[in-house]
Image (spheres, helix red, strand yellow):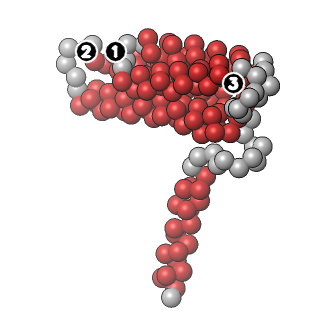
Amino acid sequence: MKYIYLFALSLLPFLAIQSVNAHCQVPCGIYGDELKFGELEQHVETIVKASAQITALSAKDTLTAQDHQQLVRWTNNKESHAAKIIDEAANYFLAQRIKPGADHYADKVELLHHIILYSMKSKQSTDGEAAKVLGEKVAAFKAIYLNHHH
């Protein structure tokens, strides 16, 4: 019985992590729009840096084992941040914040679609153009979103 109790207690941290993993769709008021935009901008910056690092490492004539590991890590990091942008665009803004009939509804939805699209393209390339357009779309969405009621 003691071992079952200890085992159950050891699982509690993992269960807590699972429940805190993503923003729920309950209007708790904890998350603010400015915070979300700061996170989106940071994700874009990370994608840009990761792409540059991948390009720089790939340009070397010979790659060491450490170089290969760094390539994998930068690639995983870039893809993770692009996925976070997609998640925020869909689960925070589209699902919770953009209301049908709101001012500039179609423009906001179109910009969010572009953000999702260029996040995906940022996963697929390292040339920097997709990340540049992604940053522009995030900035355009931020401007229209924060300057109009939603």
Real-space CA distance between mark 1 and mark 3, rounded to the nearest whole angstrom: 41 Å
Q: Secondary structure beneath disc 1?
A: helix
Residues at badges 2 and 1 in contact (C-beta under 8 Å)?
yes
Real-space CA distance between mark 2 and mark 3, rounded to the nearest whole angstrom: 47 Å
Residue at figure coordinates x 52%, y 32% from the top left: 86
* 14 w.r.t. 97: above or below: below
Residues at badges 2 and 3 in contact (C-beta under 8 Å)?
no
**Residue 41 seen in the current view:** no
Of mark 1 and mark 3, the one earlier in the sequence is: 1
Residue at figure coordinates x 70%, y 32% from the top left: 100
- Amino acid at the residue labelled 3: Tyr
- Amino acid at the residue labelled 1: Ala
Residue under label 3, please give it: 105
Residue at figure coordinates x 48%, y 34% from the top left: 83
Residue under label 2, please give it: 60
Is residue 29 shown left or right of residue 70? Answer: right
Is residue 125 shown left or right of residue 39? Answer: left
